[in-house]
Image: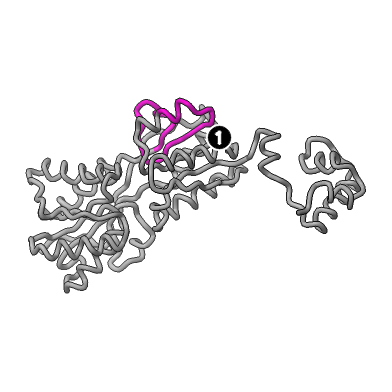
């Protein structure tokens, strides 16, 4: 293994001089720096970044905790992309930590990022409760912002969308088109986002004087496969409906396949809508009516709040209705 001492010997300087050249704290003559850089190139030496971070107490990095069960899909690809590009705009490196399959493992991922001396941490939680997140923030000296979860005690350390209101907005559009028999595909069990979207669906029906029909409620798990299975289950029940609202666009695409296999045309025979404004829904045929979740604005807001505290208060963001081809008045 190549060490800093090997570089010093090849460059004909002391170990301390190599260290000063790498840290940039003390000016090193250009001719000496050139010899050091040449020695580094020839030996293939790589500085121990963690050791330098510990010495400098600064990493120029922002951490992101996301559970791996959420990686699979365009929505979370978009989340990671915006987190990386916005971190880069601030001159920071994004460090991704896997929250795995439990609240404890999400805590372990947060602890890992803290041990790496990340300047700030974003958490997209799946398992940690609001109370647990509050406790983590209270006990942390590292700035933390929680994404997609409302924290009443830490309003300036969370960024979220009002998913229930977004669901009611979508339902108002579907009801205005004349749909009264609207089926709903839920998200994964225990998901706060899924629960809010289901609550908005039920609230909008009751406000319109329609009691939700349990036979029109089927369970999904956010994935396209689960949407396909939910669509097949709904069709097998042989209950009348004119529209299906899926808890996200990925599931809506799966539902569409089940409908098309059953000989139903979209939107002539059944209308279909979703949430999140996935790129897949935009280019699907017919293009998918959905709710746009402003992920880029949320991530930008979160990083600005972490790195420039006091300049950008984090608040609730609103979903926006996107009307496309997959919804039409019922026959």
Q: Quadrant of residue 132?
A: top left
For this view, does 285 lie left or right of residue 219? right
Q: Which residue is mark 1?
A: 307
| Residue 301 visible in the shown view | no
Coloring scheme of the render?
one colour
**Other-residue count near label 1 (Cα within 10 Å), few / some / many at <14 / 14–19 / ≥20:** some
**Residue shown at 28% from the left, 50% from the top:** 188
Question: Vertical placement of 14 versus 245: above or below?
Answer: above
- The image quadrant of residue 157 is top left
Quick check: 61 left or right of 158? right
Of residues 239 and 132, which is closer to you in this image? 132
In the image, what residue occupies the spot 79% across and 49% down? 3
Tell me residue 160's x, y (percent): 37, 39
Is 327 rendered above or below residue 94?
A: below
Q: What is the x, y in percent for residue 298?
A: 43, 42
Please give left or right for residue 1 compared with residue 272 in the image.
right
* x and y percentages locating residue 133 in the rendered image: 40, 33
Part of the protein shown in magenta: 135-159
User: How many marks are shown on the rendered structure?
Assistant: 1
Compared with residue 138, is residue 19 higher up or lower down, i.e. above or below? below
Q: Is residue 235 visible?
A: yes
Verify whether residue 318 appears in magenta: no
């Amino acid at each position: 293994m190549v060490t800093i001492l090997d570089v010093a010997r090849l460059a004909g300087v002391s170990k301390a001089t190599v260290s000063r050249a790498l840290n940039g704290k003390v000016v090193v003559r250009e001719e000496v720096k050139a010899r050091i850089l040449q020695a580094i190139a020839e030996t293939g030496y790589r500085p121990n970044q963690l050791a330098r971070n510990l010495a400098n107490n600064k990493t120029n990095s922002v951490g992101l905790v996301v559970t791996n069960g959420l990686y699979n899909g365009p929505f979370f690809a978009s989340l990671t992309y915006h987190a990386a590009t916005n971190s880069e705009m601030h001159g920071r490196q994004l460090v991704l930590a896997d929250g795995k399959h439990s609240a404890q493992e999400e805590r372990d991922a947060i602890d890992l990022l803290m041990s790496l001396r990340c300047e700030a941490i974003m958490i997209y939680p799946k398992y940690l409760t609001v109370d647990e997140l509050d406790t983590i923030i209270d006990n942390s000296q590292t700035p933390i912002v929680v994404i997609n979860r409302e924290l009443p005690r830490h309003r300036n350390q969370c960024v979220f969308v009002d998913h229930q209101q977004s669901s009611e907005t979508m339902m108002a559009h579907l009801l205005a088109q004349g749909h009264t028999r609207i089926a709903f595909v839920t998200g994964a069990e225990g998901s706060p986002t899924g629960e809010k979207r289901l609550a908005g669906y039920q609230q909008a029906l009751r406000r319109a004087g329609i009691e939700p029909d349990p036979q029109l409620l089927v369970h999904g798990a956010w994935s396209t496969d689960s949407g396909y299975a939910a669509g097949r289950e709904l069709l097998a029940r042989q209950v009348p409906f004119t529209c299906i609202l899926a808890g996200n666009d990925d599931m809506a695409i799966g539902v569409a396949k089940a409908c098309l296999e059953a000989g139903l045309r979209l939107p002539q025979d059944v209308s279909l809508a979703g949430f999140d404004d996935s790129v897949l829904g935009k280019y699907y045929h017919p293009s998918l009516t959905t709710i746009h979740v402003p992920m880029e604005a949320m991530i930008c807001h979160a990083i600005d709040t972490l790195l420039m505290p006091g300049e950008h208060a984090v608040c609730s963001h609103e979903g926006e209705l996107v009307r496309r081809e997959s919804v039409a008045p019922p026959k």
